[in-house]
Amino acid sequence: MLKSKLASIAAAAALSFGVVGAVQAGPLGLIAGDFKFTIDNYDSGTTGYGAGSPVCSNAAACDAAAPSKAPGSIGSVNASADTMGIFSVALITRISDNSVFWQKGNGEYLTGVFGNLVDYRVSNVDNDGSMVTSTRAEGGTWALYKTGVDYDPTHGPSVQAGVLDLNALLYPGITGGQAWLSGIFATGVRAGDTQTTYASTYNTDTVAGAGQGYLDVTGGTEKTTFDTNSLTDKNGEKRDLFMDITFNDADGKASKTCGDINDPSTCWTVTSAGQIKGQAVPEPGTMALAGLALLGAGLASRRRKS
Protein backbone atom coordinates (compact mmCIF):
# COMPACT_ATOMS: atom_id res chain seq x y z
CA MET A 1 0.00 0.00 0.00
CA LEU A 2 2.79 2.41 0.95
CA LYS A 3 4.60 1.60 -2.29
CA SER A 4 1.45 2.31 -4.30
CA LYS A 5 0.86 5.60 -2.50
CA LEU A 6 4.43 6.77 -3.06
CA ALA A 7 4.16 5.85 -6.73
CA SER A 8 1.02 8.01 -7.11
CA ILE A 9 2.66 10.95 -5.37
CA ALA A 10 5.81 10.59 -7.48
CA ALA A 11 3.75 10.50 -10.66
CA ALA A 12 1.83 13.62 -9.67
CA ALA A 13 5.05 15.38 -8.71
CA ALA A 14 6.61 14.44 -12.03
CA LEU A 15 3.57 15.82 -13.80
CA SER A 16 3.86 19.05 -11.83
CA PHE A 17 7.49 19.57 -12.81
CA GLY A 18 6.67 18.64 -16.39
CA VAL A 19 4.00 21.33 -16.54
CA VAL A 20 6.28 23.94 -14.98
CA GLY A 21 9.12 23.00 -17.31
CA ALA A 22 6.91 23.36 -20.35
CA VAL A 23 5.78 26.81 -19.29
CA GLN A 24 9.33 27.98 -18.54
CA ALA A 25 10.81 26.63 -21.75
CA GLY A 26 10.59 29.96 -23.52
CA PRO A 27 13.51 31.93 -24.94
CA LEU A 28 15.02 32.30 -21.44
CA GLY A 29 14.20 28.96 -19.85
CA LEU A 30 14.07 29.02 -16.04
CA ILE A 31 15.07 32.56 -15.08
CA ALA A 32 14.06 33.00 -11.45
CA GLY A 33 16.98 34.27 -9.38
CA ASP A 34 20.19 36.10 -10.25
CA PHE A 35 21.07 36.65 -13.90
CA LYS A 36 23.55 38.37 -16.19
CA PHE A 37 23.02 39.71 -19.70
CA THR A 38 26.27 39.68 -21.67
CA ILE A 39 26.06 42.44 -24.26
CA ASP A 40 27.92 43.95 -27.21
CA ASN A 41 27.17 47.41 -28.54
CA TYR A 42 28.13 50.35 -30.70
CA ASP A 43 28.21 53.86 -29.21
CA SER A 44 27.98 57.30 -30.73
CA GLY A 45 29.55 59.70 -28.24
CA THR A 46 30.70 63.26 -27.75
CA THR A 47 34.46 63.38 -27.11
CA GLY A 48 37.31 65.88 -27.37
CA TYR A 49 36.24 68.26 -24.59
CA GLY A 50 38.72 71.03 -23.81
CA ALA A 51 41.17 70.89 -20.92
CA GLY A 52 40.11 71.70 -17.38
CA SER A 53 38.80 70.22 -14.18
CA PRO A 54 35.94 70.65 -14.53
CA VAL A 55 35.61 71.55 -18.19
CA CYS A 56 31.91 72.19 -17.64
CA SER A 57 29.42 71.77 -14.82
CA ASN A 58 26.00 71.92 -16.51
CA ALA A 59 24.49 70.58 -19.72
CA ALA A 60 24.50 73.90 -21.59
CA ALA A 61 28.16 74.55 -20.75
CA CYS A 62 29.12 71.01 -21.81
CA ASP A 63 27.32 71.53 -25.13
CA ALA A 64 29.38 74.67 -25.66
CA ALA A 65 32.65 73.01 -24.59
CA ALA A 66 32.38 70.13 -27.07
CA PRO A 67 34.09 71.02 -30.39
CA SER A 68 31.82 68.54 -32.19
CA LYS A 69 28.77 66.67 -30.96
CA ALA A 70 28.14 62.94 -31.22
CA PRO A 71 26.89 62.08 -34.74
CA GLY A 72 23.75 60.60 -33.21
CA SER A 73 22.77 63.94 -31.67
CA ILE A 74 23.07 66.10 -34.80
CA GLY A 75 19.53 66.69 -36.07
CA SER A 76 18.12 64.45 -33.33
CA VAL A 77 15.00 65.03 -31.26
CA ASN A 78 17.53 65.53 -28.44
CA ALA A 79 20.39 67.59 -29.86
CA SER A 80 21.96 67.82 -26.38
CA ALA A 81 22.41 64.06 -26.07
CA ASP A 82 26.03 62.90 -25.81
CA THR A 83 25.85 59.09 -25.59
CA MET A 84 23.56 56.83 -27.62
CA GLY A 85 23.78 53.57 -29.55
CA ILE A 86 22.61 50.04 -30.27
CA PHE A 87 23.25 46.78 -28.42
CA SER A 88 22.82 43.04 -28.79
CA VAL A 89 22.44 40.45 -26.02
CA ALA A 90 24.84 37.56 -26.61
CA LEU A 91 24.03 35.42 -23.54
CA ILE A 92 21.78 35.33 -20.52
CA THR A 93 23.25 33.28 -17.68
CA ARG A 94 22.72 32.69 -13.98
CA ILE A 95 25.69 34.13 -12.10
CA SER A 96 25.50 31.73 -9.15
CA ASP A 97 25.95 28.52 -11.18
CA ASN A 98 26.83 29.83 -14.68
CA SER A 99 23.88 28.03 -16.24
CA VAL A 100 22.85 29.36 -19.65
CA PHE A 101 19.21 30.42 -20.08
CA TRP A 102 19.45 31.85 -23.57
CA GLN A 103 21.98 32.37 -26.35
CA LYS A 104 21.46 34.44 -29.47
CA GLY A 105 21.11 32.73 -32.83
CA ASN A 106 18.82 30.30 -34.65
CA GLY A 107 16.55 33.13 -35.74
CA GLU A 108 16.06 34.60 -32.25
CA TYR A 109 17.81 37.77 -31.09
CA LEU A 110 17.47 40.38 -28.37
CA THR A 111 18.61 43.73 -29.77
CA GLY A 112 18.13 47.21 -28.41
CA VAL A 113 18.57 50.96 -28.65
CA PHE A 114 19.60 53.49 -26.01
CA GLY A 115 19.98 57.27 -25.96
CA ASN A 116 19.24 60.62 -24.31
CA LEU A 117 22.27 60.56 -22.01
CA VAL A 118 23.31 64.20 -21.64
CA ASP A 119 26.74 65.13 -20.27
CA TYR A 120 26.36 67.76 -17.55
CA ARG A 121 29.79 67.57 -15.91
CA VAL A 122 33.11 66.81 -17.63
CA SER A 123 36.63 66.87 -16.21
CA ASN A 124 40.04 66.31 -17.81
CA VAL A 125 42.94 65.46 -15.52
CA ASP A 126 46.56 64.53 -16.15
CA ASN A 127 47.18 60.98 -14.96
CA ASP A 128 50.93 60.42 -15.08
CA GLY A 129 51.32 62.06 -18.47
CA SER A 130 48.10 60.69 -19.94
CA MET A 131 44.98 62.84 -20.01
CA VAL A 132 41.87 61.17 -18.57
CA THR A 133 38.32 62.39 -19.22
CA SER A 134 35.59 61.77 -16.67
CA THR A 135 31.97 62.43 -17.56
CA ARG A 136 28.72 62.44 -15.66
CA ALA A 137 25.49 62.21 -17.63
CA GLU A 138 21.84 62.73 -16.75
CA GLY A 139 18.69 61.28 -18.31
CA GLY A 140 18.82 58.21 -20.53
CA THR A 141 16.29 55.81 -22.05
CA TRP A 142 16.54 52.33 -23.56
CA ALA A 143 14.42 49.61 -25.20
CA LEU A 144 15.15 45.95 -25.95
CA TYR A 145 13.32 44.03 -28.69
CA LYS A 146 12.99 40.36 -29.58
CA THR A 147 13.84 40.16 -33.28
CA GLY A 148 14.49 37.63 -36.02
CA VAL A 149 17.89 39.08 -36.98
CA ASP A 150 20.83 40.55 -35.10
CA TYR A 151 21.53 44.28 -35.11
CA ASP A 152 23.09 45.84 -38.19
CA PRO A 153 25.57 48.60 -37.24
CA THR A 154 26.28 49.55 -40.85
CA HIS A 155 23.32 51.96 -40.84
CA GLY A 156 25.48 54.18 -38.64
CA PRO A 157 24.28 56.61 -35.96
CA SER A 158 23.50 59.64 -38.16
CA VAL A 159 19.89 60.80 -37.93
CA GLN A 160 17.49 60.05 -40.77
CA ALA A 161 14.12 61.67 -40.14
CA GLY A 162 11.45 59.08 -39.38
CA VAL A 163 13.88 56.21 -39.95
CA LEU A 164 16.83 56.48 -37.59
CA ASP A 165 17.15 58.57 -34.44
CA LEU A 166 18.77 56.83 -31.49
CA ASN A 167 17.38 59.36 -29.01
CA ALA A 168 13.88 58.65 -30.28
CA LEU A 169 14.77 54.95 -29.81
CA LEU A 170 14.37 54.51 -33.56
CA TYR A 171 16.75 52.26 -35.50
CA PRO A 172 16.19 50.11 -38.63
CA GLY A 173 15.87 46.39 -38.00
CA ILE A 174 15.51 46.77 -34.22
CA THR A 175 12.54 48.98 -33.39
CA GLY A 176 9.07 48.91 -34.84
CA GLY A 177 7.55 46.01 -32.92
CA GLN A 178 6.57 45.62 -29.29
CA ALA A 179 9.43 46.13 -26.83
CA TRP A 180 10.54 43.07 -24.86
CA LEU A 181 11.89 45.34 -22.12
CA SER A 182 12.17 49.12 -21.85
CA GLY A 183 13.22 51.58 -19.23
CA ILE A 184 15.35 54.47 -18.05
CA PHE A 185 18.83 55.08 -16.70
CA ALA A 186 18.46 55.67 -12.97
CA THR A 187 20.50 57.69 -10.48
CA GLY A 188 22.59 56.16 -7.71
CA VAL A 189 25.81 55.17 -9.48
CA ARG A 190 27.69 57.70 -7.32
CA ALA A 191 27.23 57.96 -3.55
CA GLY A 192 25.55 61.21 -2.53
CA ASP A 193 24.85 62.12 -6.17
CA THR A 194 21.16 62.31 -7.11
CA GLN A 195 21.70 63.61 -10.65
CA THR A 196 24.14 61.27 -12.41
CA THR A 197 22.58 58.33 -14.27
CA TYR A 198 25.72 57.22 -16.14
CA ALA A 199 29.38 57.78 -15.26
CA SER A 200 32.33 57.09 -17.55
CA THR A 201 36.09 57.50 -17.53
CA TYR A 202 38.34 57.14 -20.57
CA ASN A 203 41.74 57.99 -22.00
CA THR A 204 41.30 61.30 -23.78
CA ASP A 205 43.49 60.32 -26.74
CA THR A 206 42.39 56.72 -27.34
CA VAL A 207 38.79 56.97 -26.03
CA ALA A 208 39.30 53.63 -24.28
CA GLY A 209 37.55 53.38 -20.95
CA ALA A 210 34.58 52.16 -18.95
CA GLY A 211 31.12 53.25 -17.88
CA GLN A 212 28.53 52.25 -15.28
CA GLY A 213 24.92 52.99 -14.44
CA TYR A 214 21.75 51.63 -12.86
CA LEU A 215 18.70 50.86 -15.00
CA ASP A 216 15.03 50.73 -14.08
CA VAL A 217 12.49 48.68 -16.05
CA THR A 218 9.34 50.61 -16.93
CA GLY A 219 7.73 48.61 -19.75
CA GLY A 220 7.87 45.76 -22.23
CA THR A 221 6.28 42.34 -22.45
CA GLU A 222 8.71 40.94 -19.83
CA LYS A 223 8.34 43.82 -17.37
CA THR A 224 6.91 41.70 -14.55
CA THR A 225 9.88 39.33 -14.73
CA PHE A 226 12.62 41.95 -14.42
CA ASP A 227 10.96 44.86 -12.57
CA THR A 228 12.09 43.56 -9.18
CA ASN A 229 13.83 46.45 -7.35
CA SER A 230 16.38 43.83 -6.30
CA LEU A 231 19.50 46.01 -6.25
CA THR A 232 20.40 48.78 -3.80
CA ASP A 233 22.22 51.72 -5.36
CA LYS A 234 24.89 53.93 -3.75
CA ASN A 235 22.19 56.11 -2.19
CA GLY A 236 20.11 53.28 -0.74
CA GLU A 237 17.42 53.38 -3.44
CA LYS A 238 16.09 50.18 -5.04
CA ARG A 239 16.91 49.56 -8.72
CA ASP A 240 16.24 46.75 -11.17
CA LEU A 241 19.51 46.38 -13.11
CA PHE A 242 23.16 47.44 -13.07
CA MET A 243 25.17 47.94 -16.24
CA ASP A 244 28.98 47.80 -16.39
CA ILE A 245 30.76 48.16 -19.75
CA THR A 246 34.19 48.76 -21.28
CA PHE A 247 34.70 50.51 -24.62
CA ASN A 248 37.36 51.39 -27.19
CA ASP A 249 38.06 51.57 -30.91
CA ALA A 250 41.51 50.02 -30.79
CA ASP A 251 40.93 48.00 -33.96
CA GLY A 252 39.12 50.80 -35.80
CA LYS A 253 36.05 48.61 -36.10
CA ALA A 254 33.60 51.21 -34.79
CA SER A 255 34.80 54.08 -36.99
CA LYS A 256 34.80 51.84 -40.08
CA THR A 257 31.41 50.26 -39.46
CA CYS A 258 29.02 52.74 -40.98
CA GLY A 259 27.18 53.65 -44.13
CA ASP A 260 30.09 55.61 -45.63
CA ILE A 261 33.63 54.97 -44.36
CA ASN A 262 34.80 58.13 -46.15
CA ASP A 263 32.52 60.29 -44.02
CA PRO A 264 33.47 60.05 -40.32
CA SER A 265 30.26 61.84 -39.31
CA THR A 266 28.29 58.73 -40.20
CA CYS A 267 30.44 56.36 -38.14
CA TRP A 268 30.34 55.06 -34.58
CA THR A 269 32.69 56.29 -31.86
CA VAL A 270 33.49 53.06 -30.02
CA THR A 271 32.45 49.44 -29.66
CA SER A 272 31.56 48.20 -26.20
CA ALA A 273 31.23 44.94 -24.31
CA GLY A 274 29.80 44.40 -20.87
CA GLN A 275 27.14 42.97 -18.65
CA ILE A 276 23.83 43.84 -17.07
CA LYS A 277 23.08 42.18 -13.73
CA GLY A 278 19.90 41.80 -11.72
CA GLN A 279 17.33 39.45 -10.25
CA ALA A 280 14.38 37.84 -12.03
CA VAL A 281 11.15 36.29 -10.81
CA PRO A 282 9.04 33.55 -12.45
CA GLU A 283 6.23 34.72 -14.67
CA PRO A 284 2.87 34.80 -12.82
CA GLY A 285 1.49 32.12 -15.11
CA THR A 286 4.40 29.85 -14.28
CA MET A 287 3.85 30.22 -10.53
CA ALA A 288 0.12 29.63 -10.88
CA LEU A 289 0.62 26.43 -12.86
CA ALA A 290 3.26 25.27 -10.40
CA GLY A 291 0.75 25.76 -7.58
CA LEU A 292 -1.95 23.82 -9.45
CA ALA A 293 0.45 20.99 -10.23
CA LEU A 294 1.57 20.70 -6.59
CA LEU A 295 -2.08 20.79 -5.55
CA GLY A 296 -2.58 17.85 -7.88
CA ALA A 297 0.18 15.98 -6.07
CA GLY A 298 -1.58 16.65 -2.75
CA LEU A 299 -4.94 15.45 -4.07
CA ALA A 300 -3.34 12.25 -5.35
CA SER A 301 -1.96 11.62 -1.88
CA ARG A 302 -5.36 12.16 -0.29
CA ARG A 303 -7.05 9.79 -2.72
CA ARG A 304 -4.58 7.02 -1.80
CA LYS A 305 -5.27 7.63 1.90
CA SER A 306 -9.02 7.33 1.32
Image (tube, rainbow, N blue to C red):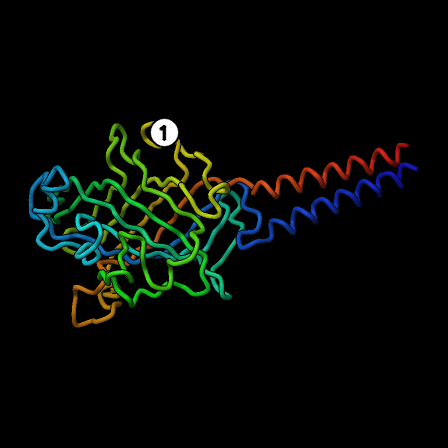
**Place of residue 293 in the rendered image (x, y in percent of width and height, measured from the top left):** 72, 41
The quadrant in which the C terminus is found is top right
Side of 192 relative to 88 (left or right): left
Q: Is residue 162 above or below residue 143?
A: below
Residue located beneath label 1 in the image: 237
The image shows residue 38, relative to residue 197, as above or below, that is: below
Query: For the point 57% across and 53% down, which residue is it?
Result: 26
Give the total number of marks visible in the rendering.
1
Residue type of the residue flagged with mark 1? Glu
The residue lying at 72 percent from left, 44 percent from top is 16
Residue 229, percent across and down?
43, 34
Give x and y (percent) for residue 96.
51, 42
* Residue at (30, 35) in percent of width and height: 187
Query: Which quarter of the rendering shows the N terminus?
Result: top right
Label 1 crowd bin: few (<14), some (14–19), many (20+), radius 10 Å: few
**Position of residue 9 in the picture relative to residue 175 (left or right):** right
Choose between 81 and 212: the one closer to the eye: 81
Residue nearer the viewer, 245 or 86: 86
In percent of width and height, residue 57 lies at 12, 37
Q: Nearer the viewer, residue 141 or 263?
A: 141
State the image quarter where residue 110 is shown.
Answer: bottom left
In this picture, residue 130 sits left or right of residue 189: left
| 160 with respect to 181 (left or right) | left
The residue lying toward the viewer, choosing from 297 and 182, is 182
To which quarter of the image does residue 150 belong? Answer: bottom left
Residue appearing at x 24%, y 37% in the figure: 196
Residue at the right extreme of this rendering: 1
SS class, disc 1: loop
